[in-house]
Amino acid sequence: MNEQFDPKEPVDPIIRAQLTRRSAGPLPEDLELQVSRALGTEAAPRARFALPRIRLTAPRLAGASVGIALVAILVVALGAPALRGGPAASTGYPYDRALTTDQLVSLLAGPAPAINTTLVVTTTIDLRSDVCPMNRYPTAGVIHGVSPQICVMESGLPPQLSGASGAATSIAGTFAFRYLGGNVDSYLGLLGQITPSASGLAYSVTDEWPTDGKAFVVEGFLGAYSSSCMLSVSLASPGDVLNPSGDDPCWQNWLSADGSPAPTVYPASDLGGSSSGSSSGSGGGAPTTGVPMPADTSPSTDPTVVPRLPAPASAESAASSFDPLALYGKARFVEAGGMRQIDSVTRDTVHGTWVVRGVTAGCPGAAGYDSRGCMVWRILARVSDVLGATPSPSIATPSTTAAGYSPPPPATPAITGPLAPALTGIVGPGGRPLTAEELNGLWAADPSGVAGRLAIVTLNGVQQVVRIESDGTPSPYGPTLANNGSPSPLSAAPKDVPGQINQLVLVDAYLDWVPSLECDTPPYPSDSLCGAGALTSVLTSAPLASQGIGNPHIAPFPSGVYGFEVALGAYQIYGSSDPSARPIHDLFLLSGGVIVTRMVPTTPLTGSSGATGSAPTGLIGPNNAPLTTSQLEAVILTDQYRLNGRYVIDMRSICDGGADCSGIPPKAVADLIQPDGSTGLVGPLDLAPDGRLVWKVPQATATWDKRYIFIVDASISHSGEATYLSSDASAKLTAQAGAYDKFAPPGTGAGASGRGLYVVTRVDTGKTCLAVPTASGADCSPQVEILARLEVATLP
Amino acid sequence: MERALVENARAGDRAAFDALVRSRIDAVYRTSLAILGNEADAADATQETFVSAWRHGSELRDPDVFDAWLGRINLNACRAQLRRRGRKVVREIRLLDPADDSEPASAERPLADRQADADIFDRAFARLSVDDRAVLVLHHLQERPVAEIAAVLGAPTGTIKSRLHRARAALKSALAKESR
């Protein structure tokens, strides 16, 4: 023991023993490798340690320009014609021209575009601030000479209209807008005035982009790779739809001219000559740093491996001149996190036309508090293919032309009406993939109801996500589909689901909201939710009993409940415009923690009995005994697919991952059947004081503090949304709202009670009430979440 | 030798930094695990610690206090992990190995009882602030000198002594609540 120890506070052997236990276990075998990889993706450490940080100064820009010029010279020497490939040949909107005012008017006169649709329009804006009041944005003006008026709102940051100050009353140019909604009048949010390219409207990735802070349009392929970050949940806020953030934790985004893989800039020590020293830390594993610049550009199948490409012209240039503005090969690094969330752009490499602007952000490697800024490219929006998607592409002559523009009508009301929900996707009965025949049948029955939707379908024996085109053709959509398309409970893979890399996953989850300090994405929040108490959308594994729970500033999620924030506005977009409709329990298609869409089964989910509500029943052995290992295996073999996602009560030994379980006596546990037929541990079951597996409610409440997961023999009843479990009149457990509809046995009528075995888990740490407690607190009941109603397994 | 490694790493020598990682990763991981009680979070915190140390190496002025400096970064990484965990609470069930002899006084006690004790301790420990957890880990597990704890936590030694007392009391109170 060290002599400096304070004798007044000796080491406590019990605390020491418990802390030793907590910190015991082997070091994760790949941790050192993961750290090494993370360090390897840290850009240019020499610049951090030895060179001044990059600043947005004229010399730096000049240097960057020189760098770009040098790269350009090299590129020209190596074969410039290859640079401007297919994308450069694109014509039409929005590649070489913008919409006209007439086209905009015609477009808005038809079926309303989706909220946040991005349009590029050449038009004139009358600068006015006395019209079009809106909750969230100041008015920039109105589109000149049209009626009903088209209002132009601006985010206020940064200034977007050149020449808009002073005595100017109007400004003509090409602008990028997001459609914010509207009724009689339409509301456009100004993303920026567009600087056109020399060859038309859109720049190529390999063109020299404007560095004056003005917005411009780029045609190219947006890709992303995981930047070896181990954080499974770190979804950043998308920011404002007119001024999105660039944050995309754990991901690096880039735009390329031809869809080629990601560029990588190497730390100085990774390049030439230092490999011997830096590659020795992996304990025999493959070196991840210090290797020469590889020539292999094939994408790795390991999602944690960052593709490494020969981007910089030389090792020295990579080490000393990493510049977030520079062109590397045919690609540039961009910030795109906020846009991805707002425009639901998956992590696949996707072609599109993007509104981009050079913005000031943190310098590479700079501390968070460093106020000095560096310029980076940020994608503000994906331009919507409104002409291609419009059923009738011909643009009609607007009913009102620019001529005879009269003073605007009285101020228009703010947008407060209900929002159009996002288009839902389609899955088969019970959440399983559709068959090709079923998809054809849906199309035949209601083509317009199916067109444009995503669907999970089994085609040629492969489960995949497809988009139903306007002619009924299913087109492959997005990356790989996990779990063979079968829905997973969100709690089943808590560390993996939101962080799936380049993968779509269908989850059974609750879409909810919690109070937030931030206002939701406009125009979604109603007055009652924005300002005094804004909301943040969350996806959870179980319904939250209180609106405060889940907000880290108020109360974290209860033990056993897994949840994470999803994009602002997700509750309204994929759930309901009614805040009181929370939570929304359904299937959701996720990609990288982002909701791609809400999926709706073509028929309701059914339990094994075929007669229950939406929740499948769990299984227990005969005589209320846990299934033995052999019994469970036999049951799973009988019907693996039907058991997917069901709870089972069985006996097995459990121990820490990787440890030898031999010698540890088996105990009763709750397991969840996985899509592949394996079992995932939910937790060991607490035994009743008499040693039996099944509790009565009074027993449960009497020893409440030590219970986590247990089985209770009780009757289920409800009063409105409130659900109760009781074994007699002396006590009752309060279950999650709406549980009655999901778990009541078949044939249980309204108001009646149904007895059964219920697997429940405690969802808080003490006695609470659903609503405001009574003065005495006598009516308060413990809260549980019903996980499943059990049925006796039919043994083969 | 050690000082030279730190100086070289601080100047951007990746090989030197890798050597420091190899020699410290186990200690950093165990400290994180003791504070966070979750292997995945501890791994994340460990990675974040070294990445942050590499990123901010130039800010270390005195190579001789590298370990205290790294410890403070580690503590901040654990704090960040707990903030994130507030949004994604996952209860990890860790069971005792019957052969585990880390609890000398309980050799004759049934495994189930020891498991219950461990569960209660973990829940009680989870009630403590990060600073309380850290001071308990640094003192009772790592037996670090008060002066070093003070350097890691960035507080005077007198404050550390009072924090130790307060953290111990907080743990006792939490254990009482969880044992009811």
Image (tube, coloured by chain):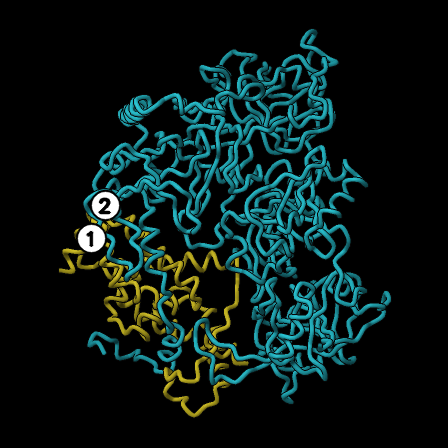
In which quadrant is the C terminus of chain A drawn? bottom right
Residue at coordinates 36% horizontally, 31% vertically from top-left?
A329
**Amino acid identity at mark 2:** Ser
Question: What is the display colour for chain A?
Answer: cyan
Residue A21, quarter of picture: bottom left
Q: Which of A666 and A783 is in front in this view?
A: A666
Q: Is the C-beta separation of discs 1 and 2 under 8 Å?
A: yes
Residue A559, quarter of picture: bottom right
Q: Is residue A377 above or below residue A533?
A: above
Q: In this view, does A206 lie above or below A271?
A: above
In which quadrant is the N terminus of chain A drawn? bottom left
Residue at coordinates 48% horizontally, 81% vertically from top-left?
B115
How far apart marks 1 and 2 lie (CA) works out to 9 Å
Residue A107, can we see it? yes
**Amino acid identity at mark 1:** Gly
Residue A405 at x, y percent in the picture: 68, 10
Q: How crowded is mark 2: few (under 14 residues within 10 Å), some or many (20 or more)?
A: many
Q: In this view, does A682 lie to the left or right of A42?
A: right
Q: What residue would you read off at disc 2?
A: A269
Q: In this view, does A254 lie to the left or right of A111?
A: left
Q: Which residue lies furthest to the top in this view?
A: A403
Q: Which chain carries label 2?
A: A
Q: Residue furthest bottom?
A: B108
Q: Is residue A557 above or below residue A759?
A: above
Q: Which residue lies furthest to the front in this view?
A: A460
Residue A667 at x, y percent in the picture: 57, 82
Residue A307 at x, y percent in the picture: 38, 44
Residue A58, can we see it? no
Which label was assigned to residue A277? 1
Question: What is the display colour for chain B?
Answer: yellow
